[in-house]
Image: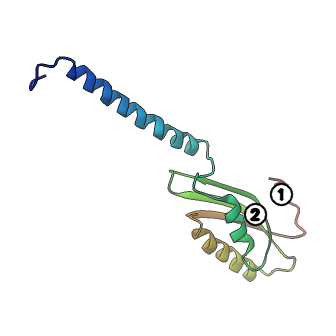
Amino acid sequence: MHFTSALFLDPALSVLLTLFVLWRVVCNLRTTVRIFLQSVPEAMDVAAVERVVRAVPGVCSVHDLHVWSMDGQYNVLTLHVVVANGTTAAEMVRIKQQCRDALRGQNVHHSTIEIETADECCELEGC
């Protein structure tokens, strides 16, 4: 209003600025809600993550796999890995480390891996 006599300019720009801010809030709200609900990150392919872990030598199967994001960038994963009966403690450590290495390539920054033997009963196997 200082530079022009167009009185409609100030309210029009105020409304445009408000609409822009509201649009950005709506766009970010979806991402924020997904993070709060601990949803699978949009860019994460859970089936590919499972295939990568199953490809590690010594892994028989995988279950109870959960992936979520802490902030939209830092992805977290938990899963149970089943190994053959008679697998030694040293082999389990190797399998766990190879799983973690493979998961880093899938954009997983923190993983919690529980190792189970084939004859071990897991109440979460149907997850």
Side (left or right) of 23 relative to 62: left
Q: Image point 47% across, 34% down: which residue? A: 26
Label 2 SS: strand
Q: Which residue is disc 1 drawn over?
A: 125
Indicate the position of residue 115 as horizontal and vertical percent values. 76, 69
Where on the picture, by quarter, is residue 65?
bottom right
Viewer-nearest residue: 22 or 39? 22
- Classify 26 as above or below 9: below
Indicate the position of residue 112 as horizontal and vertical percent values. 66, 63
Label 1 SS: loop
Residue at far top of view? 7
Q: Which residue is disc 2 drawn over?
A: 80
* Mark closer to the chain start, 1 or 2: 2
Indicate the position of residue 59 as horizontal and vertical percent values. 78, 74
- Classify 17 as above or below 100: above
Q: CA distance from mark 1 to mark 2?
A: 8 Å
Would you call the spot at circle 2 few (<14 residues within 10 Å), some (14-19), or many (20 or more)? Answer: some
Quadrant of the frame with the N terminus: top left
Would you call the spot at circle 1 few (<14 residues within 10 Å), some (14-19), or many (20 or more)? Answer: few
For residue 15, the mark is none
Q: Image point 75% across, 63% down: which residue? A: 80
Where on the picture, by quarter, is residue 87?
bottom right
Please name the amino acid that badge 1 sits on. Answer: Glu
Side (left or right) of 120 relative to 3: right
Q: Image point 74% across, 77% down: which residue? A: 92
Viewer-nearest residue: 27 or 53? 27
- Classify 118 as above or below 28: below
Q: Are marks 1 and 2 in contact (CB under 8 Å)?
A: yes
Q: Image point 58% across, 51% down: which residue? A: 42
Please name the amino acid that badge 2 sits on. Answer: His
